[in-house]
Amino acid sequence: CYLAGKDLPKSVIEEPEPIQYVSLRQAPLKEPTYTKMEEEEN
């Protein structure tokens, strides 16, 4: 369940396949970094 790429709910972040949607954003494969980027965009 992937959304627009940004605007991902926290429920998706907790899913066991973070690498795939993180790669879509070309972000580092680290959830904390990915989460920070989301907060800054919002």
Image (cartoon, rainbow, N blue to C red):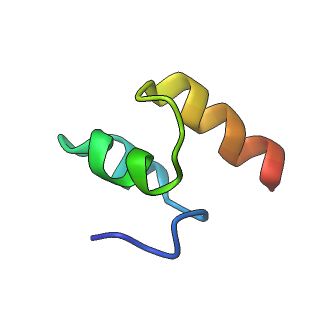
Residue drawn at x 60%, y 63% as measured from the top left = 6
Name the outermost residue toward the left: 16
Whether residue 21 is situated above or below residue 5 in the rendered picture: above
Residue 12, how many percent across, how many down?
35, 54
Residue 24, how many percent across, how many down?
43, 57
The total number of labels drawn is: 0
Residue 38, how many percent across, how many down?
67, 47
User: Where is residue 15, by image quadrant?
Assistant: top left
Whether residue 24 is situated above or below residue 22 in the rendered picture: below
Left or right of 18, for residue 23: right
Residue 13, how many percent across, how many down?
39, 44
Whether residue 7 is situated above or below residue 34 in the rendered picture: below
User: Front-most of 10 and 6?
Assistant: 6
**Residue 6 in sight:** yes
**Residue 11 in sight:** no
Residue drawn at x 51%, y 46% as measured from the top left = 26
Left or right of 17, for residue 4: right
Left or right of 24, for residue 18: left
Residue drawn at x 59%, y 36% as measured from the top left = 35
User: Front-most of 5 and 12?
Assistant: 5
User: The C terminus is located in which quarter?
Assistant: bottom right
